[in-house]
Image (spheres, grey):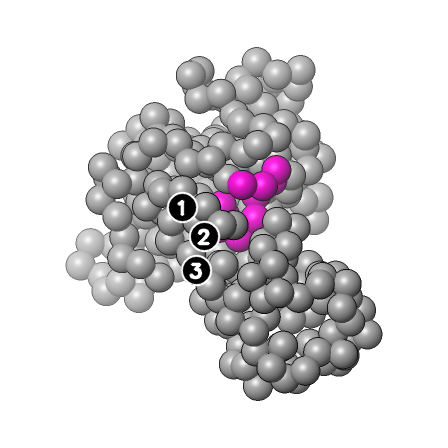
């Protein structure tokens, strides 16, 4: 991935996404942006009840919390307060931040333990917002950052230096989970995801071997997060098919090797270009 940006770069003008909901580029940008502001910092306070003046203000919103790992607000408080953020990353559209206890003075970095992962899926109208820093805006929604916390804030982390990060979800279709870092990649949801096309795109041979197994339309297979690649949503699949000059209803098992290679190349092109331009605050190509 590109090198980390300076604080000034991370606070450029608001980006506008081409789609109606978060897809891989927006989640990639959000994880990168949030990481600039919280990695290496300790969590001073966790506010796990709704804030911002919405209809459920002061309530724990169980609809956006995984009942198995986040049954109540106190669970989040106990898991994250006084923990230090050591990374913010994503696989597909699943974002996660890892938190660990700071080692005793003079102890090596490997002494960081135990480690807890906070997983976030933004759903259709979710966002992770840093106070005072512009985030992605979508065609169908945007969260008003003129007030803090924003309306429909479900979870807020206050770092030791007073940096504030809010998970905001208007339609309540996102999901917050907790896991131990040891289980992060070996249990769902991450363990069920296909390859990430930004960070772990399969070779052309492996891609063809996977996609030709399916008797379903190319678009349907690419939208399935568990089959060939993960993180690609509706507008991205449409753009990939357009760039590859392939009708989205063509069945995967009818693809020639040449057509499969073209789809492979266009997935990489669209994903990498979208992620890079979004981080740089630039418009997408005019022919998209």
Q: Position of residue 133 (x, y in %)?
A: 35, 30
Q: Is residue 180 depicted above or below 162 in this figure? A: below
Q: Is label 2 in contact with label 3 (beta carbons under 8 Å)? A: yes
Alpha carbon separation for disc pair 2 and 3: 6 Å
Q: Nearer the viewer, residue 214 or 7?
A: 214
Span of residues in magenta: 18-29
- 44 left or right of 136 in image: left
Q: Is label 2 in contact with label 1 (beta carbons under 8 Å)? A: yes
Residue with the mark numbered 3? 272
- 251 left or right of 235 in image: right
At x 49%, y 50%, the residue is: 287
Dot 3 or dot 1: first in sequence order is 3
SS class, disc 2: helix
Rendered image quadrant of residue 48: top right
- Badge 3, how many Cα within 10 Å: few under 14, some, many 20+? some
- Badge 1, how many Cα within 10 Å: few under 14, some, many 20+? many
Q: Is residue 57 depicted above or below 92 in this figure? A: above
For the N terminus, give its image quadrant: bottom left
At x 52%, y 81%, the residue is: 203
Q: Position of residue 137 (x, y in %)?
A: 49, 32
Alpha carbon separation for disc pair 3 and 1: 10 Å
Q: Nearer the viewer, residue 188 or 183?
A: 188
The tag on residue 40 is: none
Instruction: In the displayed orientation, state which residue is furthest to the left.
Output: 106
At x 54%, y 81%, the residue is: 204
The tag on residue 278 is: 1
Residue with the mark numbered 2? 274
Residue 193 appearing in the image: no
Per the image, is 218 magenta?
no
SS class, disc 3: helix
Q: Position of residue 178 (x, y in %)?
A: 57, 49
């Amino acid at each position: 991935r590109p090198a980390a940006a300076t604080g000034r770069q991370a606070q450029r003008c608001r980006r506008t996404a081409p789609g109606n909901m978060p897809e891989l580029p927006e989640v990639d940008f959000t994880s990168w942006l949030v990481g600039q502001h919280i990695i290496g910092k300790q969590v001073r306070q966790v506010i796990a009840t709704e804030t911002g003046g919405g209809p459920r203000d002061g309530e724990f919103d169980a609809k956006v919390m995984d009942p198995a790992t986040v049954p109540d607000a106190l669970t989040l408080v106990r898991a994250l307060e006084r923990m230090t953020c050591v990374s913010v990353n994503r696989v597909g559209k699943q974002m996660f931040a890892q938190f660990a206890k700071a080692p005793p003075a003079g102890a090596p970095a490997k002494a960081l333990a135990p480690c807890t992962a906070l997983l976030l899926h933004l759903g259709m109208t979710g966002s992770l917002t840093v106070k005072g820093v512009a985030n992605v805006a979508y065609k169908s929604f945007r969260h008003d950052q003129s007030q803090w916390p924003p309306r429909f804030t479900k979870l807020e982390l206050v770092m030791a230096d007073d940096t504030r990060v809010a998970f905001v979800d208007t339609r309540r279709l996102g999901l917050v989970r907790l896991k131990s870092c040891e289980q992060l990649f070996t249990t769902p949801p991450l363990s069920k995801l296909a390859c990430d096309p930004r960070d772990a795109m399969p070779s052309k041979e492996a891609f063809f071997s996977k996609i030709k197994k399916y008797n379903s339309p190319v678009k349907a297979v690419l939208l399935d997060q568990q089959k060939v690649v993960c993180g690609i949503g509706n507008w991205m699949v449409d753009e990939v098919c357009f760039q590859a000059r392939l009708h989205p209803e063509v069945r995967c098992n009818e693809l020639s090797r040449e057509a499969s290679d073209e789809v492979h190349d266009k997935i990489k092109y669209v994903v990498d270009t979208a992620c890079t331009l979004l981080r740089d605050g630039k418009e997408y190509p005019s022919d998209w």
